[in-house]
Image (cartoon, helix red, strand yellow):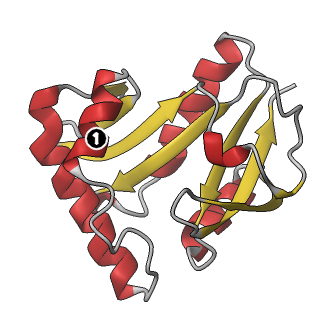
Amino acid sequence: MKLIPTKNENLPSVMDVLKDAQVYLASLNIDQWQDGYPNEAAILEDIANQESFVVHSESSEIIATAMFTTKAEPTYASIDGTWLTNENGMYGVIHRMAVANQYRKQGIAKFIFSECEQKLKDTEVASMRIDTHEDNMGMQQLLKKLGYSYCGVIFLGNGDKRLAFEKLFK
């Protein structure tokens, strides 16, 4: 497996993976991503910013997607809690991560985290931050398993509450 930059022509496949995730979250009664987000415009912006990545299967099918950046996340500037690192320091961020239904529970999300974390270590970035819906127990369990620490609550631009986590690399 490889985590590679998303190309514009990958957009339909990425949207199919995200639709799988939306249906899956709805089946768990989690209202995350049930309002049309993430949409094509968000993914195209990620691609334009070189922050969108995909994972291919052995048959070259797109089986997962994620947004990864080292740009400061505006919604992380205010937290009801405390980040592990300095507010002004550089950190990595993963957003919009989804795995196609038939590849779920096969370690793909863990692989994405590992690849993104390695990119941060290679550039001496001290930590990764991520947020998730309070009802998304699967992601919370994965974060705990991968060594992420719960730091507090952040609020998205639309006011939605998210649980915030961070992992240090040094």
Residue type, mark 1 in image: Ile
Q: Position of residue 38 (x, y in %)?
A: 32, 55
Classed neighbour count for the residue bearing mark 1: other residues with Cα under 10 Å, few (<14), some (14–19), many (≥20): many
Residue depicted at 37% across the width and 62% down the height: 104
Q: Using the rendered view, name the quadrant where residue 62 is placed.
A: top left
Note whether residue 107 is visible: yes
Residue at 58% x, 35% y is 114
Side of 17 where 134 appears, left or right? right
Please state which of residues 61 and 66 is positioned toward the viewer in this rendering: 66
Q: Is residue 76 left or right of residue 41?
A: right
Q: Is there any visible trace of residue 56 in the rendered image?
A: no
Q: x and y percent of residue 165 in the render?
A: 74, 53
The quarter of the picture where the C terminus appears is top right
- Tag count in the figure? 1
Q: Residue at x 60, y 75 (%)?
A: 137
Q: Position of residue 18 (x, y in %)?
A: 27, 58
Q: Nearer the viewer, residue 118 or 82?
A: 82
What residue does disc 1 label?
Answer: 43
Residue 62's place in the image compared with 70, above or below, is below
Q: Secondary structure at mark 1?
A: helix
